[in-house]
Amino acid sequence: MDKNRVLTYTDEDRTIVRAGIEGVRKILTGNDMDKNRVVTYTDEDRAIVRAGIEGVRKILMGNDMDRKRSMLFCLDYFMDPYYGQDISAIRDELVEMLQQIIVSKDNDTDVKEDAIDLLGSYEWGPYPIIDEHFDEIEDCLKPDVNYIRKMHIICRKRKVIFLGSSVTYGEASGGISFADMICERTGWEMIKEAVSGTTLADEGPDSYVSRMKNIKADEADLLVCQLSTNDATLNKPAGEVGESDDIGSFDTKTVAGAIEYIIAYARRKWGCYVMFYTSPRYDSRQYGKMVKLLKKISVKWQVPVIDMWSDRKFNAIDREVYDRYMADPIHPTLEGYREWLTPYMEKKILDLIE
């Protein structure tokens, strides 16, 4: 066996390892030898990165694909701000090399995908090398490459209002939610109007409608509104989709009326883009009915919905992983936001506002 051989891994592999030994055991004792190979890196690889750009360049611009995969995996540790590693001295040259890897015809697709993932996860464009050679990139990679090359345009400075309750607030994660994480990463100006336990149905000063009216901003680019689970829990009246667009015609004491009022108010007050999002799937028939109602309203108003409730692939995660991601059936943990909800929400939001 080639002692230097190193192969790729996926986000699913990371999830399996974090979930515990049983998932790892199932794979390592299985029969699929190709699928079970896992990319690795060593303390020597970390030392190379810490020593400066030349050692990194020698590997990334070389011909050993396995060695490149190992170094790219190591760079994930250094580029991820979560680990607090300062690579500011080599960052510009590193970003240039990652672009060169993506456009080079001499690199394997797996290596290119790892480079794309690093740029998409931790950097912003523009990427002049990719722009210059975009037409030469393999067709299978173009959608992902096109996405990362447009991110700096999509994510120009924006003022975003996040209106919601506990999931928007971050009830089980110290007040930090996807809203905070997305805005920290994009540099958007955030107005987070989120109070746990509140409802869309307007029955007091803490309701969505009442709090939205008290937002002092004179302008906004985007309103992201949560479909509150509290309306389902408290069995608030669903109401019906209205026939009129007149803001005065909506019964805001119902879920449907409140949703329509929020859309009409945001467009009148700020002239901004509006989108709603649902919670991931949990055991609630009533919330499921609310999701269907929201979709009917979205058709009327041409308002997009980020529908985590109905996304089977998104919800199909291992039970042990789910227990780490969710403090209870409704509220994500900090890890759940960071690894599950936030990447999903950010991608959906950026796709919708492009």
Image (cartoon, grey):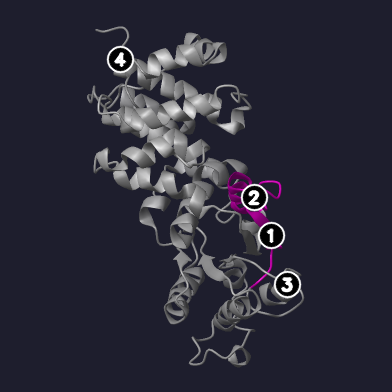
User: Please, what secondary structure does the residue beneath circle 2 have?
Assistant: helix
User: Please, what secondary structure does the residue beneath circle 3 have?
Assistant: helix
Q: Amino acid at mark 3?
A: Arg
Q: Give the position of the N terminus as an image quadrant.
A: top left
In this figure, which residue is indicated by the disc labeled 2?
Answer: 180
Q: Magenta residues, as a range?
A: 170-199
* Mark nearer the N terminus (2 vs 3): 2
Residue 200 seen in this snapshot: yes
Confirm or deny contact between disc 3 and disc 4 (CB under 8 A): no
Specify whether residue 193 is painted magenta: yes
Q: Residue at x 42, y 38 (%)?
A: 128
Q: Residue at x 53, y 67 (%)?
A: 276
In this figure, which residue is indicated by the disc labeled 1?
Answer: 192
Residue 53 image position (x, y, % from top left): 51, 16
Q: Amino acid at mark 4?
A: Asp
> Counting other residues with Cα less than 10 Å from the Cα at mark 1, is it few (<14), some (14-19), or many (20 or more)?
some
Q: Residue at x 32, y 9 (%)?
A: 4
Q: Amino acid at mark 1?
A: Lys
Residue 310 image position (x, y, % from top left): 40, 62
Residue 211 has which mark? 3
Confirm or deny contact between disc 1 and disc 2 (CB under 8 A): yes
* Mark nearer the N terminus (1 vs 2): 2
The Cα atoms of the two marked residues, 1 and 4, are separated by 48 Å
Residue 64 has which mark? 4
Confirm or deny contact between disc 1 and disc 4 (CB under 8 A): no
Q: Name the residue nearer the viewer: 92 or 299.
A: 92
The Cα atoms of the two marked residues, 1 and 2, are separated by 8 Å
With 2 as the anchor, is 78 left or right in this view? right
> Counting other residues with Cα less than 10 Å from the Cα at mark 4, is it few (<14), some (14-19), or many (20 or more)?
few
Residue 15 seen in this snapshot: no
Residue 240 image position (x, y, % from top left): 50, 86
**Residue 269, relative to residue 49: is it above or below?**
below
